[in-house]
Amino acid sequence: MNDTQQRLGRPDGGWRLKLYAIIFESDTPKGRAFDLALIGAILLSVLVVVLGSVQSIAVQHGAWLHAAEWFFTVLFTLEYVARCLCVQRPLVYVRSFFGVIDLLSILPSYISLFVPAAHVVLGVRILRLLRIFRILKLTLYIQEYSMLGDALLASRRKIFVFLSVVFLIVFLLGTVMYVVEGPENGYTSIPTAVYWAISTMTTVGFGDLVPKTDIGRAIASFMMLLGWGILAVPTGIISSEITYQRGRAILPLRACSSCHSTGHASDAQYCKDCGTAMP
């Protein structure tokens, strides 16, 4: 039993245990079939939302798409209720990551009864496909995802400082461009000039604002070259943190009791050299 199942609370018996085994345990044939069917339903429901956003298809098949959308909404609602009923601590599931995603996947349909535009948020259902990691048992990818998350969390202060410096640069250079170019060349205000500075610094360059003076073009050229270097900074920060995280995962002093080799991973169960079980 994994940590998630322990937090949710496995039922002791009866119909709740049978339902729990089907919904939450993908190791059993019924559980795996349920998860695969769920992923198929998620894909179809997202396809319905995508097709409904195409005007020509919506006009011709709007009634069918609307009916299909409500069919999947009711289906996912029953699934959500079943998940809450078959665990001993339903509030833990409701507050969990997948619990929040499951709830967000059905709420827009009900909200759209009062706010018609809310149905466009149904695209959030595609996030439920993250369950495929549990079904396929891709523990390696989950471990890498956790390492990336830890690296981003550990780098948050450095990234915040970096973004603050970038903001100061684009604000100052945007203000300079406002003074140099002026409203007659499209730079009607400092916020507009800052918008141009951001699009130039990030090498996007929409082309809706273009410097007309020689000084403005020189500033724009400098910002383009500066943008190349700036874009590499967050990558370097996160990469160094990932390297540090990988280094922490290796325990140099953890030695094998048989061959005495060192450098084993913190979660290693067997020696990488002789195969002896690690303590």
Image (cartoon, rainbow, N blue to C red):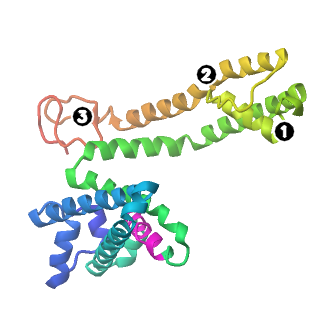
Q: Determine whether label 2 and label 1 are within 8 Å by CB.
A: no
Q: Residue at x 85, y 38 (%)?
A: 188
Q: Residue at x 32, y 47 (%)?
A: 142
Which amino acid is tagged 3? Ala
Which amino acid is tagged 2? Trp
Specify few, some or many for label 3: CA neighbours under 10 Å numbering under 14, 14-19, or 20 or more.
some
Q: Position of residue 274 (x, y in %)?
A: 11, 30
Q: Nearer the viewer, mark 3 or mark 2?
A: 2
Whether residue 109 sits left or right of residue 210 in the image: it is left
The answer to whether residue 225 is above or below residue 239 is above
Dividing the picture into quadrants, the one containing residue 205 is: top right
Q: Which residues are magenta?
A: 97-110
As drawn, the label of residue 255 is: 3
Q: Earlier in the sequence, mark 3 or mark 2?
A: 2
Dividing the picture into quadrants, the one containing residue 272 is: top left
Instruction: Give the residue pinned by disc 2.
Output: 228
The alpha-carbon separation of the residues under discs 2 and 1 comes to: 24 Å
Q: Secondary structure at mark 1?
A: helix
Question: Quarter of the image containing the C terminus?
Answer: top left
Of 129 and 156, nearer the camera is: 129
Q: How many marks?
A: 3
